[in-house]
Image: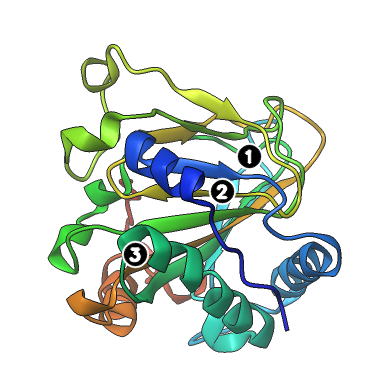
Amino acid sequence: MIATPVLTDQQVADFDRDGYVAVPGAFRGADADAAMRWTTEVQQMPEEVGKHWVFHEQSRIDGAPLINRIEYIAPFHAGFRELTEALKAPCAQLFGEEVVLFKEKINFKMPGGGGFEPHQDSQAGWDVYASNFITVALCIDAASEENGCLELAPGQHRRGLLRGMEPLTPEDTAGMTFRKHPTQPGDMVLFDAYTPHRSEPNNSARIRRMYFATYNRASEGDHFAPYHADKRRNFPPDIEREPGKEYVYKV
């Protein structure tokens, strides 16, 4: 059974102040190794219609196809189902009540893979499901400045939603300070849906995989199934797409 991380009072206070908190060594030893092993297992699972969702991108180096991210994992992998249960506890500490899983994914930032422009998760229209969310980013591979570690802007969550359905503009981010957070396997970062964050492309020869699990307050309902049904209609995994139809990823 994988261990359940517990936040300190100081970490809870830091989250309230900054909109996020970094937790080094949240998972250690066998637990960190299990998360890495499970990630590799999911990466090697064949793409099938009606199963986990695989999305691709083109390498910035030579245009070759790369795995960009895999979503909708826990229904098809026992290890990640266990992990999503373990990650509920720290999110419940921060919300002050029980939570339910909203969505989860692995971001695969391969060598040559692109970065993520500054954005708030709430910009993706999540407010139709719940008022706020907490995402746990669990480091699978060492994340450095060279391979595009997570960068977050402290204190900006208090400004609420800045822009909908498109990345933040330079005007939106004027005056913001984005702090780089290099992480090691087993470290985690928790942030709310209004915290601006970004990451640079992977300009190194080392892969940077990170697992993201997002939760909302249980009192605001369980939206896992309707969210995925809505997304499947609007932005399905690559294997389920209609030939000739254009799909646009916004945020």
Left or right position of 197 against 155? right
* Tag 3 residue: 235
**Identity, as a three-letter code, of the amino acid under mark 1:** Gly
Q: Is residue 56 left or right of residue 20?
A: right
Which residue is depicted at the point 69% across and 73% down? 3
Instruction: Give the mark nearer the N terminus: 1 vs 2.
Output: 2
Which structural element holds mark 3?
A: loop
* Foreground of the two, 109 or 162: 162
Find the residue positioned furthest to the top: 175
Which residue occupies the extreme left position in the image? Answer: 128
Considering only vertical position in the picture, is 188 above or below 217? above
Q: Quadrant of residue 24?
A: top right
Q: Earlier in the sequence, mark 3 or mark 1?
A: 1
Q: Give the mark nearer the N terminus: 3 vs 2.
A: 2
Q: CA distance from mark 1 to mark 2?
A: 7 Å
Q: Amino acid at mark 2?
A: Glu
Q: Nearer the viewer, residue 244 or 139?
A: 139
Q: Which residue type carries mark 3?
A: Phe
Q: Which residue is mark 2?
A: 57
- 217 versus 18 height, above or below: below
Between marks 1 and 2 in the image, the one whose residue lies nearer the viewer = 1
